[in-house]
Image (cartoon, coloured by chain):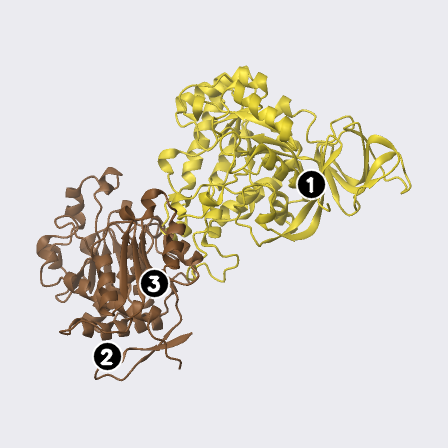
Chain colours: A brown, B yellow
Amino acid sequence: MRTVQIPEATTVGQPAERVAWNKRHVLDLDEFSRQEMEAVLDTSSAMKDVLHRDIKKVPTLRGKSILTLFYESSTRTRVSFEQAGKVLSADVINISSGTSSAAKGESLLDTLLTLQSMAADVIVIRHPSSGAPYLAARHLGHASVVNAGDGTHAHPTQALLDAFTIREKRGRLEGLRVAIVGDVAHSRVARSNLWGLTRMGAHVVLCGPPTLMPWDLLKGRETTPGHPFGAVEVELDLEKALPDADVIMALRLQKERQQMGAIPSLREYARLWQVNTERLALCRPDVLLMHPGPMNEGVEISPEAAHGPHSVVQEQVTNGVAVRMALLYLLCGPAESS
Amino acid sequence: MREQKTKADNGTLLIRGGRVIDPAQGLDDVLDVLVRDGLVAAIRKPQNASSTEARSVVDASGLVVSPGFIDLHCHLREPGYEDKETIATGTLAAARGGFTAVCAMPNTLPPIDSRSVVEFVLQRAREEGHVRVFPIGSITRGRKGRELTEMAELAKAGAVGFSDDGDPVADPYMMRMALTYSRVTGLPLIEHCETPELSGGVIHEGWVASRLGLKGIPSQAEEAMVARDLALAELTGGRLHLAHLSTRQALELVRRAKERGLPVTFEVTPHHLTLTEEEVLGLRVRASPFESLTPLAYDTNAKVNPPLRAREDVQALVAALREGLVDAIATDHAPHTLVDKVCPFDEAAFGISGLETALGLVLTIYHQGQVPLSRIVEKLTVGPALVLGAKGQGLGTLKPGTVADLVIFDPEEAWTVDPQKFASKGKNTPLAGVTLKGRVKYTVLEGKVIYDDGR
């Protein structure tokens, strides 16, 4: 375990905080204790201050190399990591599968080893196959691995920025009721949020078409003793899920779900599960509406709701940079022995 | 314990003082086995130690002597995938695992769907093989599920059964025709039971799949196909053998069919009898299944089709073996290269390299007191011989006069699995580093020692 100190430049007016941190990789939130989550969120607050400065640059990660390796298209996550690294003065190199040796048939592992040999300190990976970052972490001797989304498994930095956003708006996560609406079964955002939110003491209700619910949760509440999702509820009727919610997270609905037979039509999906102003009217007046993006406006979320007073979608994007700064800093920032 | 040379005639071998388990004869006693000219000459009460009637003597005291194991389900990969396995390496792995006969599955390149490929496999086995190789022909040409192979000619060339293994015969009409036509040869049709439209996943559809965000293969994908095939077997009178059954309800369907008198048989694998879906988490010992994942998660060496199932399925398989419902234990030995396995989970090949761990793995349920040793030996010997019908006659037993294929093993010896020491080219096993109890000491084919563990 090492203790790192939040850089002075980011903690003007605050006492230097010491954060316990012993992670080499960030693969999913199942491996984060509540204390570790809070450490990341606290560090993220300090980082967010930097983003609001006139000159958005601190020298904290000068001389560190961050490689982003994306095997799926992405705008916000990739740019968010790049911006986070650059604000901290790290060198950031972006590689996408179309331009990498993957197109020439190189295996994922060989690509990773090649990048590690070029002295990458952190490799940020997004891959369509669940578990790909675990393969990376298993075989890389030096570099840290950050999961930027793997298949339908996990998206831990998204869940951290979601937790950060909720905590910033509500001051806490404990005891809040969060409704996650949409294609939960295929959502890595939902999976990571299940770990993050339940660990922080929030109450989660999942809502969406039964064909897009994780089948094991659909069968009824998890009753295995010690199961971390024992308190997670499934409610198929959106209008029943919303009234008590403090937070609504709408998930992106991929249009292929209709072809695979999971929904009859986008029209029927929108009728039953779209978050719109009529449905927001059923909610608490201070309800937060979140979306991990990119949004299909008119399908899972109406344009009025997406850009309305409850929406914190744009702040999520800003917070994403802050959270990723915090993680990069915790993974490879200057260590100070305690 | 080492084989000793004496002055007696060439071609004689005395295996002295072992516990002879030959379920075909109901034998389980400390006995001597005398082999002459490749045949079992006599099984008798232990003689005194100075006997010199045999040229070679193996001291088997403390060991089990049984008929050589017969594997109904093995992928030797040749022709076409020699980087994964060859007939030479696969049959050497078989000998090390105590097997004296293996059935070679036809999902090769080209598939075993013509007389020339059957003959090629048999020729390679004669040239380089270490144990008997029984080719399985494919049910349909190219394993494409549209036209039947020339089953009569394949049988004449030496095929002992037919299978499109790796895939089911998806079209029920084609399976009806295949089962009906199989009456021409009388040989079993070996079905890989998986309804494609219900499958398409990479591990068992259970809590581990849900946890890992991996697409599941529901038990019902297997059970629906088992139900269909049983109905078609009843309709046609064809001879049906179900490969590697893995779910509790599939066993119940077969149980009811057998109770109705249907001549259906089925096999289970050592890994489905002992391992669960949790193997994919990559941890041997878990305090709680809800612990956080580590970089060892998504273990592609535990990716196999049918997938490792839930605990209740494993328990049901063990119970079915104990009561004798199971006809045979078969390895589904499926060797792969590192390239096939060191990759993201979705992209990894299905399969476990199983010949060399089969005995030790399956004996874990014996050591747990769940299944008697004689039952396990039965399902590795006479069980599969009966499934092969006429082609298995005279195999799987040590009756005097039959061919002297046998295995001598120590059921108590503990050893740690090191895939790098496998004879098989396939190092893909979830058991690397695991200590198993039960080790083959000698394998004897037609009276000749083809594997000696001490050498």
Mark 2 against mark 1, which lies toward the viewer?
Answer: 2
Q: Is residue A115 above or below residue B175?
A: below
Q: Amino acid at mark 2?
A: Ala
Left or right: A272 in relation to A309: right
Q: Is residue A168 above or below residue B34?
A: below
Q: Amino acid at mark 1?
A: Ser
x, y percentage for residue B221? Answer: 41, 37
Mark 2 or mark 3: which comes first in sequence? 2
Label at residue A9: 2
The residue tagged 1 is: B374
The residue tagged 3 is: A122
Marks 2 & 3 on one chain: yes
Say which residue appears at 40% left-offset and 50% top-offset.
A110
x, y percentage for residue B271? Answer: 54, 44
Left or right: A179 in relation to B64: left
Disc 2 is placed on an element classified as: helix
Check if mark 2's residue and mark 1's residue have beta carbons within 8 Å. no
Q: CA distance from mark 2 to mark 3?
A: 22 Å
Check if mark 1's residue and mark 3's residue have beta carbons within 8 Å. no
x, y percentage for residue A307? Answer: 9, 58
Say which residue appears at 28% left-offset and 56% top-offset.
A190
